[in-house]
Amino acid sequence: MKKRVFYTEWAYAVAMAGLSLSVALMTRADFGVSMVVAPAYLLYLKVNPVLPFFTFGMAEYTLQAVLLLFTILTVKKYRPYFLFSFVTAVAYGFLLDGWMALTASLPADGFALRCLWYVLGILLGAASIAFFFETYIAPEVYELLVKEIAQKLGRPTHRVKTVYDCVSCAVAVLMSFAFFGLWRFEGVKLGTVICALVNGFLIGRCTALYERVFEFRDALPWRKYFT
């Protein structure tokens, strides 16, 4: 089978648009947001009533700034392109706020429709993250952390991603209890747990599909700035 050329810069753009849309769809479904964004979502729910200008997108890149510092301390190295991950996080935050505004008008008054938005969100999210792993441009800090730890430990990326997702889910549960009261689950629901368990597998399948169908090439001579 002849592979089709897919430029890595396009992979980055598709991943950014798709991942932010997937989060907005899962939020609209209200079965629980992705475990990766759940801590940021809970931060948003806690702060927004006090500071109305504090959006979900702002919560995302605020938390990712903290994770970027953790990444540097964990892998015990610093590369200039790490900072571009934060630039990606800010751009993603703006896209997320835009998609949140657009998807707010989607009908979600029935169980079937909510299931549809949830399934579309989780599939689109996995497909988008797999694209992030195919580009040299620094991804969000979430994916950067997973990628760097996988390389440091010599483990498959999708397996490290599964562990990270489960840890993030546990952190979100603790934040929900701390912010809103013991045994009160805000933003973290059954859909969050399902996503934590299957997301790594879905990303692995998407990655295998991409590598079978596409040949990823750089269209621009920028890779040297991200290594």
Image (spheres, helix red, strand yellow):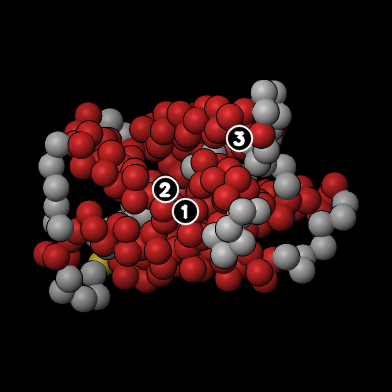
Residue for badge 2 = 63
Residue mark closest to the camera, 3 vs 2: 3
| Residue 118 place in picture, x, y as percent | 69, 49
Quadrant where the image shows the N terminus: bottom left
Against 76, residue 96 (above or below) is below
Q: Type of residue at label 2? A: Leu
Q: Nearer the viewer, mark 1 or mark 3?
A: 3
> What x and y, as percent, mark residue 47?
57, 50
Q: Residues within 10 Å of mark 1 (few under 14, many from 20)?
A: many
Q: In the rendered image, which residue does mark 3 sit on? A: 179
Q: Gap in Å between the C-alphas at discs 1 and 3?
A: 17 Å
Q: Which mark is residue 60?
A: 1
Reply above or below: 152 against 87: above
Tag 2 secondary structure: helix
Type of residue at label 3?
Phe
Specify the amino acid type for callout 1. Glu
Which badge, 3 or 2, is on the more N-terminal residue? 2
Instruction: Name the residue at 22% across, 54% down.
Output: 82
Identified at 14% across, 52% down, the residue is: 79
Secondary element at image label 3: helix
